């Protein structure tokens, strides 16, 4: 899992199926067959957005009904016939769809109400649906079309015998509708720009935080190298010289001196490994190779992973360390007959599961050690969640959910 793609992502190759036929770079890893994923659909709306969209639809229907009732009521006090009512309904009902089809609504309202004006010669109330349609069209960016429809309706109203004063009044209505529509459009654009700037600022803060974290790791690595490495090297050297001189003189080497020599050497090796981790946060290898090493050590491991799953480097690193720590704990403490490792990618998250059938029993208390604590810190740093504990059927389970951005997840 150490390969990094062109976009700085790491790839989990296909793993073997149960029959042993290789489908990727790893060998000897039992896994379930994986089919190619179809192009991923856009993520569904959240519950809040669905509720807001439903409320907007209800509001639009109510507004269309109120406007229609207003025009119908005014027509009822005049000399309107069945054709007039049909024209009013044809011009008012489409207002319920002004958000999705503003041009169609504008055309329907203008033509239907203009025909109504020519046929029945009503008052200024007949222009209300056209004014509303012109406003929504201007808000949608169709100000030229809205102005043309407004001018056409005013010309028809004046030609149908409308008074000049009423025509001027309607002209003011239409101008207000166009101006407020443009103002609303600009306000919505401003809100979108503000939201985008906030997202960009958040992304920049995250990048700065990651860069500072990397710089801090390098600083800690330098300090450890300059202080601890030097001191431990001196202890190891002096212990080695003392052991050599004692053996040269034929004296018995004190066990404490041998213990110091061995402990200092082990401390040097662990310190070097720690410095490597601080200087290079990338994973040490691929997950399938990690599983292979565990199998070689006598641990029965079954790996299930998606084919050609590409992950961002930080998610790749954390997933690798989770599997590494979980396999190490299973081998040391659980004595399981089988361990199952599962990597499952969804639209915006990667699920990492490591289950064993070891000695852990349900409801038994779990005391987090250094490994589990470090695992939780890694997951929390990515904004993910981690659940660890005994399984109901026995054994121990580690389940991490790591967030992914939709633009960084590719399944081929």
Image (tube, helix red, strand yellow):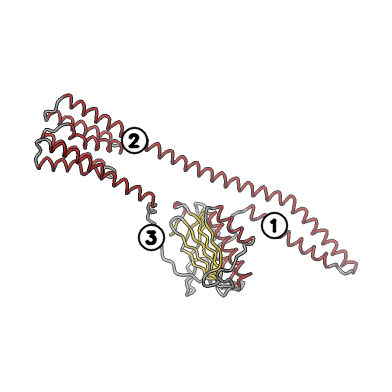
Front residue of 237/138: it is: 138
Kindly state the secondary structure of the residue where label 2 is placed: helix
Front residue of 66/30: it is: 66
Residue 388 at what x, y percent from top left? 55, 63
Earlier residue among tags 2 and 1: 2
Residue 336 at what x, y percent from top left? 58, 73
Front residue of 94/21: it is: 94
Instruction: Examine the rendered structure and indicate whether residue 152 appears above or below residue 371.
Output: above
Q: Which mark is residue 38?
A: 3
Q: Are marks 1 and 3 in contact (CB under 8 Å)?
A: no
- Lateral position of residue 109 relative to residue 393, left or right: left
Residue sitting at x 77%, y 53%: 230
Residue 239 at what x, y percent from top left? 82, 61
Quadrant, the C terminus:
bottom left
Q: Callout 3: 10 Å neighbours few (<14), some, many (20+)?
A: few
Kindly state the secondary structure of the residue where label 3 is placed: loop
Q: Which residue is mark 1?
A: 272
Instruction: Examine the rendered structure and indicate whether residue 182 appears above or below residue 392.
Output: above
Residue 115 in view in this figure: no
Kindly state the secondary structure of the residue where label 1 is placed: helix
**Real-space Cα separation, disc 1 to disc 3, in angstroms:** 45 Å
- Mark in the foreground, 2 or 1: 2
Residue sitting at x 74%, y 50%: 226
Question: How many numbered marks appear?
Answer: 3
Q: Which residue is mark 2?
A: 184
Earlier residue among tags 2 and 3: 3
Q: Callout 1: 10 Å neighbours few (<14), some, many (20+)?
A: some
């Amino acid at each position: 899992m150490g390969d990094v793609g062109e976009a700085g992502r790491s790839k989990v190759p296909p793993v073997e199926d149960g029959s042993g036929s290789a489908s990727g770079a790893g060998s000897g890893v039992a896994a379930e067959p994986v089919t190619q994923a179809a192009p991923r659909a856009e993520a569904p709306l959240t519950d809040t957005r669905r509720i807001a969209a439903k409320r907007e639809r209800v509001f639009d229907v109510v507004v269309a009904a109120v406007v229609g009732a207003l025009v119908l009521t005014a027509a009822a006090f005049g000399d309107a016939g069945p054709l007039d009512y049909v024209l009013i309904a044809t011009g008012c009902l489409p207002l319920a769809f002004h958000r999705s089809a503003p041009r169609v609504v504008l055309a329907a309202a203008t033509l239907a109400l203009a025909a109504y004006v020519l046929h029945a010669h009503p008052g200024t109330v007949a222009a209300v649906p056209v004014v509303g349609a012109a406003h929504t069209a201007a808000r949608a960016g169709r100000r030229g079309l809205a102005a043309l429809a407004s001018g056409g309706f005013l010309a028809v109203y004046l030609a149908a015998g409308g008074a000049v004063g009423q025509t001027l009044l309607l002209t003011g209505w239409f101008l207000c509708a166009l101006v407020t529509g443009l103002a609303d459009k600009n306000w919505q654009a401003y809100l979108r720009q503000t939201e985008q700037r906030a997202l960009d600022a958040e992304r920049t803060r995250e990048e700065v935080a990651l860069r500072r974290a990397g710089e801090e790791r390098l600083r800690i690595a330098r300090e450890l190298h300059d202080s601890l490495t030097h001191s431990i090297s001196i202890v190891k050297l002096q212990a080695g010289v003392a052991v050599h001189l004692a053996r040269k003189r034929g004296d018995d080497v004190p066990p404490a001196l041998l213990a110091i020599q061995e402990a200092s050497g082990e401390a040097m090796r662990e310190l070097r490994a720690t410095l490597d981790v601080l200087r290079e946060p990338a994973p040490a290898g691929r997950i399938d190779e990690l599983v292979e090493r565990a199998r070689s050590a006598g641990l029965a491991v079954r790996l299930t992973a998606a084919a050609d799953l590409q992950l961002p480097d930080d998610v790749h690193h954390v997933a690798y360390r989770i599997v590494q720590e979980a396999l190490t704990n299973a081998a040391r403490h659980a004595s399981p007959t089988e361990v199952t490792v599962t990597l499952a990618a969804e639209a915006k998250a990667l699920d990492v599961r490591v289950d064993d059938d070891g000695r852990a029993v349900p409801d038994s208390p779990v005391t987090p050690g250094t490994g589990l604590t470090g695992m939780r810190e890694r997951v929390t740093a990515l904004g993910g969640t981690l659940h660890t504990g005994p399984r109901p059927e026995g054994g121990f389970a580690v389940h991490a959910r790591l967030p992914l951005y939709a633009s960084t997840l590719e399944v081929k």
